Image (cartoon, helix red, strand yellow):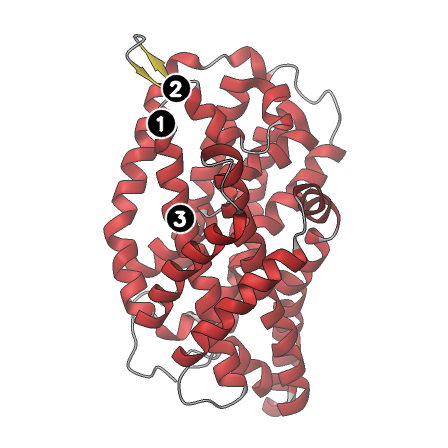
Amino acid sequence: MLKHVKISEKQFIVLLSLYIIGSAILVIPSIIVSIAKQDAWITSILTLIIALGIMPLYIALGRRYPTMLFTEFTEEILGKWIGKLFSIIFLTFPLVAGSLTLYNIGDFIITQVMPETPIVPIYVFVLSVSLFGVRLGLEVLARSGEILFPWVVALFSLLVLFLTKQINFDHFQPFFTMGLRPIFISTVHFLTFPFLDTVVFLMIFPYVKWTSKKRTPVYIGTLIGGVFLIIIIFLCILVLGVDQTSTRLFPTYLLAQEINVANFITRIEVIVAIIWFISIFFKLSILLFVLNLGLAQLFNLSSYRFLALPIGLLFLASSNIFVPSGPFLGTYTLTTSPFYTGTIGFVLPLFLFVIDRIKKKLVDS
């Protein structure tokens, strides 16, 4: 399927970076700081190091089956029927993650931008744009990412520059007042969202024109996305402080509202909104693409494109069903999400890797 589709390593880096930034740039500071308080900066650095240590697992599976999708080599490793069962379990992830991402978009717009607008029309508009991108294909999405990513970097640089005078290093103190346990718990949350989410890129690996044998673009993309989030977490603590960051749903948006340069450049939170809209568009589009592609392969369909509209309608319905309210999402994020995402993003790939190695050793012997 899609035998002639290829994207460059540079395009892969851009897509991976934007996917990691995604919805996390707005919501992750609140989650991490509410747990680890002023030590959240330690959590952010530690998590990125661990995430880079997990990437070799994905790379090993991708190199072992360079022309196969995740759903294809799962059947190759576990057999047809068991493999299909595990593939279905895997494909629940882009559906759930996409539904949560869509809710994040709608919730942000109706609470921060257009409070009197119903959430469903926002869902429809955002989905329409993403579905259009999915139907055009992976190559078009990758080229679009190349064009828009420099704007994300430029706007993010402006945000950091404008906030430098608002920084207060006293917000970092005191260190380790709550011990190591909150750092560990917050690291688990930060690792599962958004870094283990990147397991979906195993469905994109076969379409990359790899030139580096060690798959360094995987590390580079993870590093870039992680650094963006680390900087945001640092800024939220240093500018807003622990109390405001942990109690606000979208602290990064509040962060941009703090910008005041000579009483002339103020309230330019549109910077954060543009960064977020671009990154979340690519995250939602990739999740839609992966689900469409996975289902098409699972049922031996000739094309994934005609599934785009039905899958989009499924996303629309599931966003209302899976996420009935903001408090429900908060509870899910702090309780269920680490176990579910950890299982799909780490336990399942590790299980496949171990079984594959055992089978290879048995064949070689």
Report the Cα–Cα distance between label 3 and label 2: 21 Å
Indicate the secondary structure of the residue bearing disc 1. helix
Q: Secondary structure at mark 2?
A: helix
6 relative position to 69: left or right: left
Q: Position of residue 64 (x, y in %)?
A: 49, 77
- Read off the residue under disc 1: 159
Q: Which residue was labeled with disc 3?
A: 279
Label 1 close to label 2 by CB (< 8 Å): yes
Residue, x 49% and y 25% (percent of image)?
254
Callout 1 amino acid: Leu
Residue 163, disc: 2
Q: Which is nearer the N-term, disc 3 or disc 1?
A: 1
- Helix, strand or loop status at disc 3: helix
Classify residue 363 by image quadrant.
bottom right
Residues packed near mark 2 inside 10 Å, few (<14), some (14 to 19) or many (20 plus): some
Q: Kindly give the residue lying farthest to the top in the view shown.
A: 262
- Compared with 45, 77 (above or below) is below
